[in-house]
Image (spheres, helix red, strand yellow):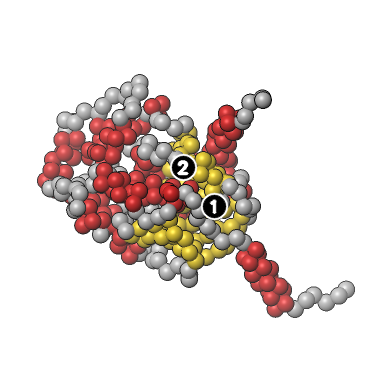
Amino acid sequence: MAPAPPLHLFFALLSLSCASWEARQEPLRVRVGDPGCSGVTLSSGTSLTLPSCLAHAGCVAGLFEVPARLATFAEPVPQADIDALLAAIEAGEVAVQERRRVDPRLGLEIVERSGATGLLEALPRTAVTVISHELVRVDGGAAHRLSLTNTWTGTYDAWLYTPEGDGPHPGVLGLHGHGEDATRYLALHSGIRYPQRGYLLLVPTRRALWADETEHRVTSELLRAGASFEAVQIFESLLNLRVLGCLERTDPDGLFMVGHSSGAISGNLSSRLAVELVAYASDYRSTYVHHIRPGQYTDEVTPALFALQERISDFSTHPLPVLQYRYGSDASVEGVDLILDFFDDLRTTADAEIQPGPP
């Protein structure tokens, strides 16, 4: 029997194989010639040094700068007024509006009541800088470690999973919940299944979702600035969809969104405003006044949306097809397959509708 090769030779060959794989990967590029993508820039950088959003408050620094930036177009709201509205809701003095057969104005009401008007007016002019820091081989494709920076809400990290092949591929924006960041969401919610099924998956870290004093402070400061944490998350979701849709590998007519827990609460709002989406999947709803304990706000606390909660949760009036999946069921491969089967069916239907007829 021939002797086994030295261990150092094995690792040298493994390293060479990985280097060869990386060398064969096409870099991420922004689609050229699309006016909507002119504000998206993409480059490569060194290893990502952002502090972990699961363990360090430093990653939320940009969120604390938003209230001052909103001062140019938002009216501040006294804390006494916020407290009075929450007290009236608690006392049963604010009626929840009934669901409607059709609800074409709901999107506009969400924007106005969440305080998102100014941010969304600025959105088309907002430039976003995307830096690819790391490339990792995964089953079915590749994982790109990104950071995204804009002038309104600062810098946050993200993972982008891309399937094998040049595409264009359909793309999904994943919105995680409390106690998660982009890395943890991918591990807990079968993120690897998306590239295996031929989908790009962009998961940005949604900052300050720890149900702690930091989350309370971010939420309360934004409410006093005349906006809300939900307004910021609507803005970032729409910006992230633009980034995803502007990648060369993405089919811009095949964009989807999945929201889990807090991500679903936010997605239930932003999905009604995202004209580029084909469909949406959600596993949760909200009253928009939930507290961890008295006086401690979570990100969803937006008292002006309380009256709209039933209309928001009524997906029969949603402008998109919506899948309501069992809470957290995307933790399994079967749960993700259920979502992607729903998306695949819609893509197949759309493809059939645009096929040319007989001559």
Q: Residue at x 48, y 36 (%)?
A: 279
The answer to whether residue 217 is seen in the rendering is no
Alpha carbon of mark 2 to alpha carbon of mark 1: how far? 19 Å
Ranked by sequence position, the earlier of labels 2 and 1 is 1
Q: Residue at x 28, y 32 (%)?
A: 308
* Foreground pick, 106 / 73: 73
User: Helix or strand or loop: what does disc 1 sit on?
Assistant: loop
Horizontal and vertical percent for residue 286? 33, 37
Horizontal and vertical percent for residue 251? 54, 45
- In this picture, residue 266 sits left or right of residue 356: left
- In this picture, residue 344 sits left or right of residue 235: right
**From this viewpoint, which residue is outermost toward the front?**
359
Residue 59's place in the image compared with 291, above or below, is below
Q: Which mark is residue 257?
A: 2
The answer to whether residue 149 is seen in the rendering is yes
Residue 285, image quadrant? top left
Amino acid type of disc 2? Met
Q: Which mark is residue 248?
A: 1
Q: Residue at x 66, y 25 (%)?
A: 359
Numbered marks: total: 2
**From this viewpoint, which residue is outermost toward the right?**
1
- In this picture, residue 169 sits left or right of residue 150: right
Horizontal and vertical percent for residue 351? 59, 33
Q: Which mark is residue 133?
A: none
Q: How many other residues sit within 10 Å of disc 1, few (<14), some (14-19) or many (≥20)? A: some
**Where's the N terminus, which quadrant?**
bottom right
Horizontal and vertical percent for residue 131? 46, 63
